Amino acid sequence: MKLLNKTSKYYVIATLIVFFIGCIVFYFAVKTFVNKDIISKMYEEKAKLETKIAQLDSISNTFFSTGDDVIIKKIPVKQVNSSISIRDTVLYDEKEENEEMPSKSITFYANSKFYTYQITIIKSLVEDDDLIEAIVIALITLIGLFLISLYFINRSISRAIWSPFYESLDTIKKFDIEDIQPIILHHSDINEFNE
């Protein structure tokens, strides 16, 4: 194997390892960021619903627009319960033949003037997962194009830089001890090749 090929091979392998680890870290960083953003939005929706419900006598015939699914259950006795539960869950899309849809839910209690309600807000994560997937695919594509272009740029630069060395090596190979002519090596602007 030629020196240039071996060097290029090691560069490509090392770069692939670094980029592979980077992609994994990037994926989990984006997923964590999106997850925190979703939870933050769910807490905002929770606060809006609590404020709205606190002003009502009863929530029958009341429309809540949150953009997500809201499940409201009336608790028989007015009670104070400040527990909040956030979970990952799976919903089934009836339109898509019961296809599983990853979701996140927040469950909390809210008091109107006379009743306590258990409220669950459910947010589908399908769009967010699709966004993360698209970002990761775009990143991998960019890294692939970068690696391919870097490989060919590195090969062409290395060939140009190493050409005086290979010319000198070729001249030395052709040298015959019985020949009276001295070895004349090519001059290079690289100090190591001129020594």
Image (cartoon, rainbow, N blue to C red):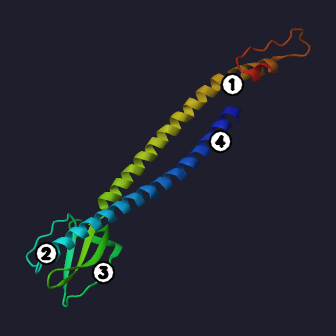
Q: Is residue 15 left or right of residue 187?
A: left
Q: Which residue is mark 2?
A: 55
Is residue 97 at least partly visible in the picture?
no
Depth check: give the residue in front, 107 or 53. Answer: 53
Taking depth in this image into account, of 89 and 55 the one nearest to the observer is: 55
Q: Which residue is mark 4?
A: 10
Depth order, front residue of 138/110:
110
**Comes first in the chain, label 3 or label 2:** 2
Residue 47 lies in quadrant: bottom left
Q: Whole-Å distance between the Cαs marked 4 and 1?
A: 17 Å
Q: Dot 1 lies on which element?
A: helix
**Residue 100, image quadrant:** bottom left
Disc on res. 179 = none
Between discs 4 and 2, the one toward the N terminus: 4
Q: Amino acid at mark 2?
A: Gln
Amino acid under disc 1: Trp
**Which labelled disc corresponds to residue 162?**
1
